[in-house]
Amino acid sequence: MPNHFASYPSLAERTAFVTGGADGIGAAIVQQLAAQGSRVAFVDKNVDYAQRTIERCVAEGAAHAPLFYEVDLLDIAQLQGACESAIADLGGVTVLVNNAASDDRHDWRDISVEYWNERMNVNLRHYFFAIQALAPQMIEARLGSIVNIGSSSYMMQEDFFPGYAIAKSAVEGITRTMARTLGPHNVRVNTVLPGWVPTERQLTKWWSPEGERATMNDQALKKRITPEEFAQMVLFLAADDSGGCTAQQFLVDGGRF
């Protein structure tokens, strides 16, 4: 972990569950939690990338190698099974990071009922069911932090992924609703919204020099926001340092919005 990032004593030995942790922002969150000494489990369907993430954590000196469960998050039963395994293997889970999503481009005129349902399921539905599976033992422990990764896409003046943007806008609804429900049990729920974070997927599939110039023009900070920088806000919300924060939305976008 770069030495200019903060260390959070409360994250040492804390147990965390991350969805979509094999690559991109999710992998950075897994690595940064592991570097804090947390015991981390994560789910994804990309086994090869997951193994690379685990190897990086070990190479960087993590006290605990992350646990990986292969899961297709469109299958809620698989997700629920992985949550049960993580509770058993880690001895409970007190941090949940709902991260997994897919921002495939599409035109609103081409959306079928089937594709609409798929966009909602891959970008929204599993957030709620992960909370449903893991929050009861947080309630019992009277300790929990749930961090939902949203997206600033619904704030953009763009129309290239309406199904994704609509689904991600609803993440804030999950956050505020569940923060009220779980707050009396000392379980916090917050949203973190990335701006343009140039992951390998973003650079390979969507990057263009024109697009980056437009983004830099809109941002107050004239630089790329790295996955590791984004992960620092997640660490803060997972740690006891943010004990007074819940039902909130945090932007990590370089001052774009």
Image (tube, helix red, strand yellow):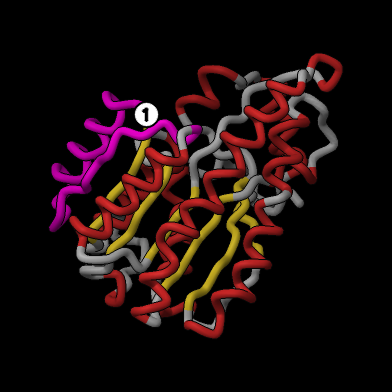
Which residue sits furthest top? 110
Between residues 54 and 97, which one lies in front from this camera angle?
A: 97
Q: Position of residue 199 (x, y in %)?
A: 48, 32
Residue at 37% from the left image edge and 29% from the top image edge: 45
The three-letter code of the residue at mark 1 reads: Lys
Question: Which residues are the magenta region?
Answer: 45-74
Left/right of residue 247 with respect to residue 39 in the rendered view: right
Quarter of the image holding residue 119?
top right
Q: Position of residue 14 (x, y in %)?
A: 27, 68
Between residues 59 and 48, which one lies in front from this camera angle?
A: 48
Residue at 14% from the left image edge and 42% from the top image edge: 59
Check residue 193 for magenta coloring. no
Q: Position of residue 245 (x, y in %)?
A: 56, 77
Left/right of residue 176 with respect to residue 108 in the rendered view: left
Which residue in the structure is indicated by mark 1?
45
Q: Position of residue 104 (x, y in %)?
A: 63, 23
Residue at 67% from the left image edge and 67% from the top image edge: 177
Residue at 35% from the left image edge and 54% from the top image edge: 17
Vertical position of residue 38 compared to residue 59: above or below: below
Vertical position of residue 249 compared to residue 159: above or below: below
Label 1 secondary element: loop
Q: Residues within 10 Å of mark 1 (few under 14, many from 20)?
A: some
